[in-house]
Amino acid sequence: MPIALLALTAGAFGIGTTEFVIMGLLLQVSKDLHVSIPTAGLLISGYALGVAAGAPLLTLATRRLPRKLVLLALMAVFTLGNLACALAPGYGALMAARVLTSLAHGTFFGVGAVVATGLVPPDKRASAIALMFTGLTAATLLGVPAGAWIGLHFGWRSAFWAVTVTGLVALAVLWRFVPQGAGRVEPVPLREELAMLARPQVWLGLAMTVLGFAGLFALYTYVQPLLTRVTGLSESAVSPVLLLFGGGLAAGNLLGGRLADKGAMRAAVGTLLVLALVLAGARWAMPHAVSAVVFIALLGVAAFATVAPLQMRVLEQAAGAGQNLASILNIAAFNLGNALGAGVGGAVIEHGPGLQGLANLGPAAAALTLAGLGLAIASRALDRRRSRLAPLGA
């Protein structure tokens, strides 16, 4: 594997870390900037909304530019955005910096996947993409717990300084090692790409992603106050627990891929049901240390087992020239779910007296994922109806 792939992996690691690291820093940010925990949680929503808006718009705007130039520009935006986060004098400036940083997210992964496949022989393309996305997995497994540890011991700004350094390293290696013509492809006509937007099942698939994943982030966004104020763990214990979530994420990602290979729609229904059940169990699991730790690990498995089935469902329904845009839109949908979940979770906390709001996060999160499950069942019913009508049309 060429060294340029390691640059893409480093970029993916940095981007994944900066998206989620704030979850392990909510208490520090809330205290330092004199805002409530739900208000601090909106920093997740702001980032996610930036990804949701920026991913499709920047992908379409840069579709004819050299891929290396696009990657360098995106990594520069990412690095400057994290620098602005580290230097932010107040909450408003931090929110603006988070939104700026988020604009690089979705398009980096879309363009990076194309470049990765162009750096290796045809029989190594899948491995190249997998290596690049290993950076995203490593971000949740290692980057987020490390960021929480750094924030606890050196202040929350130190975590953003660390990510800024990661961005500078990735930027330098991308500039040095990615070939000028890497990933060069002739884009299909825009009309052909946009044609898939006329398919109702594509929109149903995107809505399933939004609501299904919103359930996860209604709860996981507030994992630090949950573990410290409901479970009763010390702040220093949060990082190891987040490490367990990362391990569950990696296992769930592999499990979801295998299930999706056997049928994306069936896997989507099954994994969303399991995720809803796990989220509903938070009310009973979180008040006790042992069960809370087991719950967080299971949550990682259940949540990320949904990713591959939801992504494959949208790609299957897009088909043909629209798959590239559909893939980017589904990344946007995952992030829209992040924003929705964080907002709903914050509202639940604010309207619950004392610890009651935190305790209610599980049922509220499960309700969001159940809504996504309902859409999945409706989408599957449409598939079956179409299958029954197809012979009659023939």
Image: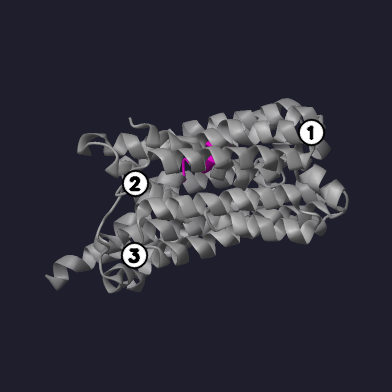
For label 1, the SS is: helix
For the point 63% across and 36% down, the residue is: 144
Indicate which disc, 1 or 3, sits on the residue closer to the N terminus.
1
For label 2, the SS is: helix
Q: Which residue is mark 1?
A: 154
Q: Residue extending furthest front?
A: 176
Q: Residue extending furthest left?
A: 394
Indicate which disc, 3 or 2, sits on the residue closer to the N terminus.
2
- Applied colour scheme: one colour
Residue nearest the observer in this picture, 367 or 28: 28
For disc 3, the neighbor class at 10 Å (few under 14, some 14 to 19, many from 20) is few
Q: Is residue 314 above or below residue 180?
A: below
Q: Amino acid at mark 2?
A: Val
For label 3, the SS is: helix
CA gap, disc 1 and disc 3 = 54 Å
For the point 29% across and 40% down, the residue is: 119
Could you tell whether 23 is left or right of 207 in the image?
right
Q: Amino acid at mark 3?
A: Leu
- Image coords of residue 205 (percent x, y): 41, 60
Could you tell whether 26 is left or right of 104 in the image?
right
Disc ID at residue 115? 2
